[in-house]
Image (cartoon, rainbow, N blue to C red):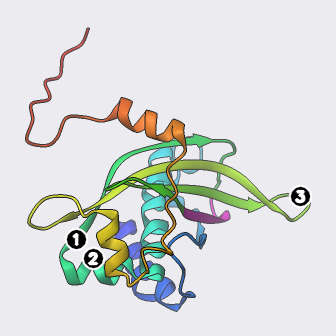
Amino acid sequence: MHLLFRTLLRVLFFARRGSRLGLHDVARARFVTLPTDLDVNRHMNNGVFLSIMDLARMDQFVRTGIFDLMRSRGWSPVVASETIAFRKPLGAWRRFTIETRLVGHDEKVMVFEQRFVRPSRDGGPEIYARAFVRKLLVRRTGGAVRFAELVDALGIDPAEADERRPPEWVERWGEEVALPPRRSEAPSTWE
């Protein structure tokens, strides 16, 4: 339930007060580890990392204009796959920043890199965890929104749109872990 309040605060207050961002700019969203985020080891639960990443991407979507566009067009963001690597734990009441950046795309899927960052001993940013998220926008009526349509709807000149491909390993990984489409069969059989 606490994520509902965090979502409302992020979308209605914090993100709307943040500076406008370009599609490939790094979005920085600040958070604090709450006691409800902790597991039995008294650090942020690994599943909470993924939930907080959703909030940071929502912040990025609001600040790039994608959020308002989604609402007006009946589009919804859907995670296709994500992977995360942990380096250091985040204990209760620790302040941290999530850096979110669109690092590449194909025709339909956008790939975001997200980093959980805190100041190091020398004051520079230090990565505590890093994730890659493959995400697409789907229509209320069904089907995925093509990246070119998103760029056009945002009013970005296609000649100026960055044609970055996702890192090669992310593309391979996305293909390896992909499940069949929703309307196809996907039996659970163990070998």
Residue 134: percent from the left, percent from the top?
40, 50
* Disc 1: CA contacts within 10 A as few (<14), some (14-19) or many (>=20): many
| Farthest-out residue, bottom | 17
Mark 2 → mark 3, Cα distance in angstroms: 41 Å
Contact (Cβ within 8 Å) of mark 2 with mark 1? yes
* Left or right of residue 102, residue 127 in this image: right
The type of residue carrying mark 2 is: Met
Q: Secondary structure at mark 1?
A: strand
Q: Indicate the amino acid at tag 3.
A: Arg
Q: Is residue 183 above or below residue 151?
A: above
SS of the residue under disc 3: loop
What residue would you read off at disc 2? 70
Residue 13 in the image: above or below residue 43: below
Q: Residue at x 59, y 64 (%)?
A: 98
Q: Which dot marks residue 121? A: 3
Which numbered marker is on residue 75? 1
Chain-order first, disc 1 or disc 3: 1
Name the outermost residue toward the right. Answer: 122
Q: Say which of marks 2 and 3 sits in front.
A: 2
Question: Which image quadrant for residue 149?
Answer: bottom left
Magenta region, residue range: 92-101
Most extreme residue toward the front, as rendered? 159
Residue 117: percent from the left, percent from the top?
69, 59
- Quadrant of residue 122 in the image? bottom right
Q: Are marks 2 and 3 in contact (CB under 8 Å)?
A: no
